[in-house]
Image (cartoon, helix red, strand yellow):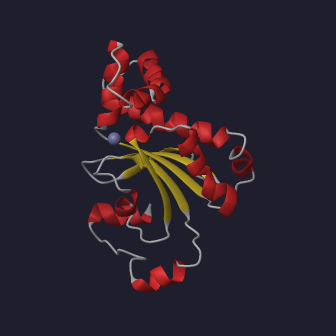
Amino acid sequence: MTGNRRWVTGALQHPDRDPTRRELLAATQKPYGVVLSCIDSRVPPELVFDTGLGDLFVMRTGGQAIGPVVTGSIEYGPMTGGTPLIMVLGHQRCGAVAAAYQALKDGKPLPGNLQAIAEALRPAYEQTTRGGSADPIETMTKNQVTLTADALRGNGDLGPLVIERKLAVVAAYYSLDTGQVEVLNGAPD
Ligand SMILES: [Zn+2]
């Protein structure tokens, strides 16, 4: 979050991006966080948190949709290397969420494998339609990251790490307008 404040204000440090850092990490890595975010070209976690080499495990899928392979990739750091933080990061004006919302609303599947993303976002869609919203795309995006973070926090493998306070799972939202990351839930005390 300190790095994100630098991103917002433009006071970037570009840490951990030189040959010394590369050599230091050549034999082993110990990132301090896992980020699952969208493929959107405007939301690269390494840039929006002003991080460098070896700092983050990063997974990116359309609408930060999740499935077994993605979940396994998220679990890798916390389960094998003690990575203490997972962030599920949604963002403003997400095209994937907008497309999924429309496809599910109209009952018209998206072409090809894009429909798999819509299906992965169905629980967030259903929560959104139940609640009603003036801005359903933004609401669905926030529902998607909080539902995903809740599921990771409670799953059989990560849940015990959360209870032991070795792991925090945070849902967050990125503003394209300001560059700011807002934590929605799961921040450690
Ligand atoms: Zn997106």
Q: Give the residue at x 51% y 50%.
A: 87
Is residue 13 shown to the viewer in this render?
Answer: yes
The picture places residue 6, in percent across and down from the top left corner, at 34, 67
Left/right of residue 63 with respect to residue 57 in the rendered view:
left
Q: Residue furthest front?
A: 112
Screen quadrant of the N terminus: bottom left
Task: Check the image and report above or below for 123 versus 7.
Answer: above
The picture places residue 26, in percent across and down from the top left corner, at 53, 79
Q: Give the residue at x 39% y 62%.
A: 46
Q: Nearer the viewer, residue 31 or 141?
A: 31
Q: Residue furthest top?
A: 107
Q: Give the residue at x 62% y 61%.
A: 83
Q: Nearer the viewer, residue 8 or 151?
A: 151
Q: Residue furthest left?
A: 177
Q: Give the residue at x 68% y 55%.
A: 79
**Would you identify the image quadrant in which residue 53 lies?**
bottom left
Task: Check the image and report above or below for 178 versus 22.
Answer: above
Q: How many marks?
A: 0
**Would you identify the image quadrant in which residue 136 lies?**
top left
Task: Check the image and report above or below for 137 versus 4.
Answer: above
Q: Nearer the viewer, residue 15 or 102?
A: 102
The picture places residue 121, in percent across and down from the top left corner, at 45, 29
Is residue 139 shown to the viewer in this render?
Answer: no
Give the image quadrant in which the ligand numbered 1 is located.
top left
Left/right of residue 75 with respect to residue 66 in the rendered view:
right
Task: Check the image and report above or below for 58 versus 19.
Answer: above
Q: Nearer the viewer, residue 82 or 112?
A: 112
